[in-house]
Structure formats: C-alpha cells, structure tokens
Image (cartoon, rainbow, N blue to C red):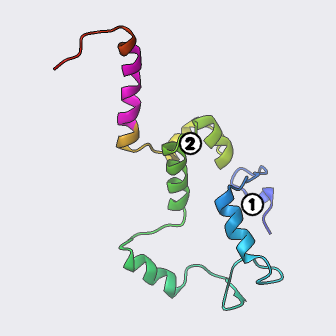
Amino acid sequence: MPCALNSKNRKPLGVPLNQTALSILYRQFGKHPIRVFTYNGKPIANANTRAWRQALKRADISNFRWHDLRHTWASWQRQNGTQLDELQKLGGWLSESMVRRYAHLSSEDISQASMRIDAAFDKLNLPKST
C-alpha cells in the first residue's frame, strides 16, 4: 500500500493527475474490484513480463530501466514549458539541483530560448543583416 514511508524522502507526495491519466484510469473502472489494471480479467501483478521484454525488443529499446521513465517525464515537462519550481513540486524533489539531473531541454528548446532576445533588439530598430 502506498504511503509516505515508501517515498524516497519519507514525506507525503501528492500526485495531481492530468486529463490523460484520469481518462486512462476511468476506462479501467469496474474491470476488477481492487486492482486498477488487468489483463484478461486478472490483475497485473508484474509488468516485467515476457510480453513487455518482447515489446522493448521490437521498439529497439535496450538497457531499459523503469526509473528512466521519471527522467523522460521530467524532460517532457520542461520541454513543454513547466518551470523548474513547478516541476520540483510535481516530482517531489527536495532541491532544484535534483530537478536539473532529471529534466533536460532539447537542443530545439535551447535554440528557441536563445532567440527570445531578438524581441529586445527588434525594439532598437537595428539594421538587419542581409
């Protein structure tokens, strides 16, 4: 049973769910009296099955670690505009430095960020290069 004692820093972590997550959970309602996810009417007790490993192989994913999904989630949050302080609260990290270990911007995001200063230069009416 999940509780604060099971979290890494032993503090309660509220997990707000977005509409996509809620939609997935609502579709599972009524399939089992206790468990959320089932397969052929039976609760899924272990996700690391042969079928899962075959799916990873078909997707050409090697060296998969479940914890990698936390890095992916944090990076997708940052790449879609979530600020570091918001992400720190969402992920339950105690420090900004830990958030930075998990969340990475893509080179495209960094390139777009570098162009934000153009608006300031545009106000100066500097001659444009040809």
Rendered image: mark on residue 95: none
Of residue 60 and residue 8, the one placed in the foreground of this image is 60
Residue at which label 1 appears:
6
Residue at which label 2 appears:
99
Residue type highlighted by circle 1: Asn
Residue, x 24% and y 10% (percent of image)?
Answer: 127
Residue, x 41% and y 69% (percent of image)?
Answer: 63
Label 2: how many Cα within 10 Å (few below 14, some 14–19, many 20+): many
Q: Nearer the viewer, mark 2 or mark 1?
A: 2
Label the magenta part by its dominant secondary structure. Answer: helix
Of residue 49 and residue 55, the one placed in the foreground of this image is 55
Is-magenta flag for residue 116? yes
Farthest-out residue, left: 130
CA separation in Å, label 2 and label 1: 20 Å
Position of 93 with respect to 77 (left or right) is right
Q: Is residue 105 above or below residue 62?
A: above
- Range drawn in magenta: 110-120
Measured from the top left, where is residue 23 in percent x and y? Answer: 69, 66
Quadrant of the image for the C terminus?
A: top left
Is-magenta flag for residue 7? no
